[in-house]
Image (spheres, helix red, strand yellow):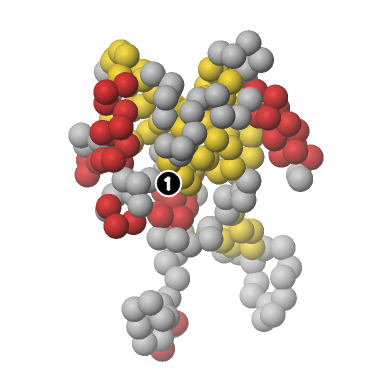
Amino acid sequence: LLEKIINVEKFKIRVSKQIVTGDEDVTMKFYHDALDLGEEGIMFKNLEAPYHHGRRVGYIVKMKPESKDLDLVITGAEHGTGKRAGWLTSYIVACRNKEGDFVNVGKVASGLKEKEEQGTTYLDMTKILKPLIISEKGNRVEVKPKVVVSVTYQNIQKSPTYSAGYAMRFPRITNYRPDRNNKDIATLKDIKEAANHSFLGD
């Protein structure tokens, strides 16, 4: 109905995109696409719920990134596929433990851009990381821990998947930080504190 009555004007007014799905992968792609377009996040609505004008009755949930971020170092990457083939497009990121070793805390596959005018691109990051490659196996590479990025996340949970023992949910690169080195990154203590805050709903 809205599509019939709204005259779309670029950069002024448009009908919000929507999908109907129960697939988590489809949902996450829709979420990351929205963030790449500069949107705040996405809304979930129960299709069986009645509509009540002007009322917030618990049938709608918003998902958006946390405003907090962590500076982490890239320790590995994966080659992209499809239109991102030839680029390194997923990045393993790490914090530093009390012994000074790097421990991985997640994989980030969103936040960088595809077009140069939009900011740091996947091509830019690929050029930065390629000289730092230590080893390569399949579509994965290990790199020297030199490149620091700022990463936002929805929450942090305990996880056996990564060597830190924790994993970020819905991580997203917000900035490439050439002004920082791997001594400036978050510590495992920072990760644990952030996980506790996530658990408490802070």
What is the number of callouts on the image? 1
| Residue 121 location (% of width, % of height) | 31, 45
| Residue sitting farthest toward the front | 179
Which residue is under mark 1?
A: 111
Q: From the viewer's perspective, is 135 left or right of 83? A: right
What is the three-letter code of the residue carrying label 1? Gly
Q: Residues within 10 Å of mark 1 (few under 14, many from 20)?
A: many
Tell me if I can see residue 93 in this picture. no
Identify which residue, 87 or 15, lies in the foreground.
87
On the question of residue 202 being in view, the answer is: yes
**Outermost residue toward the right in this view:** 200
User: Could you tell me which quadrant the N terminus lies in?
Assistant: bottom left
Q: Position of residue 188 (x, y in %)?
A: 65, 23
Question: Which residue is located at x 53 percent, y 17 percent?
Answer: 102
Q: Residue at x 55, y 24 (%)?
A: 183
Q: Residue at x 64, y 63 (%)?
A: 60
Q: Which of the 4 image quadrants contains residue 25?
A: top left
Q: Nearer the viewer, residue 94 or 16?
A: 94
Residue 166: quarter of image = top right
Tell which residue pokes out farthest to the top in this image.
Answer: 99
Q: Name the foreground residue: 51 vs 158.
A: 158
> Which one is nearer the viewer's eye here, 143 or 87?
143
Q: Position of residue 35 (x, y in %)?
A: 46, 55
Q: Is residue 164 above or below residue 129?
A: above
Describe the element under mark 1 as helix, strand or loop. loop
Picture coordinates of residue 31, whole percent (x, y) = 47, 53
189 sits to left or right of 70: right
Which quadrant of the rendered structure holds the C terminus?
top right
